[in-house]
Image (spheres, rainbow, N blue to C red):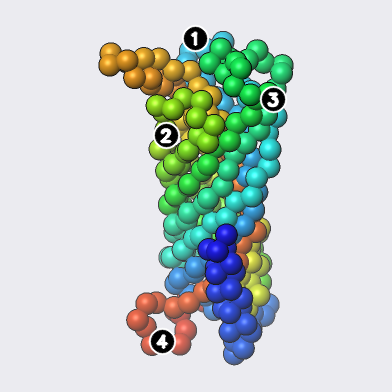
Amino acid sequence: MKINFYLTQILVILFFNSASAKRPVTNGMPVITPWEIGLSTGASIFGTSFNQDANAMYKRHSYWYRDINPGIGLFVVRNISPSLGIEVNWLNTRLSGRWNKGWPTLPVLIGLEGPLTFSSQINQFDLMMVFNLDQIMLPGDEEDKGHFFVKTGIGISKIKDNKGFYPDINSSALSIALGGGYSLSLNEKIKLQVGSILRAVNTDNLDGVHVVNKNKSGKLTEFTQIIEIYNYTYFSVSYNFGDFGSHKSKSSFKRRR
């Protein structure tokens, strides 16, 4: 896609611009900045469904042999302190798979295609808190180039069922994220991360198949309380910069989130 090409070019320019940073990261205390912007790329996979209905026959299940699909994301981080940051991000990815014949085919799906598959397009928006575990465990300690981190927060999952199993139902659902990984600072400007995030989405629509009922107007509606999970494992590059409109050459922070 063109957007991927342009984003990659921007990050390459930022990378070479940062190569001339006056003070590269050492084993001492690297300077950090209040703001970061970045790009992530990785792979997503559908997890499973949890049915919270007390009378449900199956509490946890997945009907599918699941595929691994590419994903791409953008994020902005506001560093509050050496141990804490707030991250806003967007992720675009797809979840897909083929029917596990260990399950009987649901009546609504019989005769649609063979073999039966699902395909859901996901636009994910999150607000998360990011914790530097090294600084939490050893507060005030001088930071090295790398550290482990944990992030958690809430978001909205906008789901499009490409198969159209239930044409009258599309979903925008609340989600909860929990993830972690490792961060490595190349210099004052460029940081690399590798990590993984699980998202629990309050929907029965991630895989396009769900139990439905008709309301008084005859429209199909979801009536079971189901949470579905998917995973995104990624590699990211971020560029660090100071306060907007500030002429200060360095941040007041002394360690990197």
* Mark sitting on residue 171: 2
Q: Choose the circle earlier in sequence order: 1 or 2.
A: 1
- Disc 4 marks a residue whose amino acid type is Lys
Q: Is residue 25 left or right of residue 211?
A: right
The mark closer to the camera, 4 or 2, is: 2
Residue 88 occupies quadrant:
bottom left
- Disc 1 marks a residue whose amino acid type is Asn
Give the crowd class for mark 3: few <14, some 14-19, many >=20 residues within 10 Å.
few
Residue 53 visible? The answer is yes
The mark closer to the camera, 2 or 3, is: 3
Residue at coordinates 51% horizontally, 25% vertically from top-left? 165
Q: What distance separates the C-alpha of mark 1 from that of mark 3?
A: 31 Å
Residue 198 occupies quadrant:
top right
- Disc 3 marks a residue whose amino acid type is Pro
Instruction: Find residue 16 and report its horizontal and vertical position in percent.
Output: 62, 82
Mark 1 touches mark 3? (CB < 8 Å): no
Q: Which residue is mark 3?
A: 115
Q: Choose the circle earlier in sequence order: 4 or 2.
A: 2
Mark 4 touches mark 2? (CB < 8 Å): no
* Mark sitting on residue 76: none
Residue at coordinates 62% horizontally, 57% vertically from top-left? 41
Q: Choose the circle earlier in sequence order: 2 or 3.
A: 3
Give the crowd class for mark 4: few <14, some 14-19, many >=20 residues within 10 Å.
few
The mark closer to the camera, 4 or 1, is: 1
Q: Which residue is mark 1?
A: 55
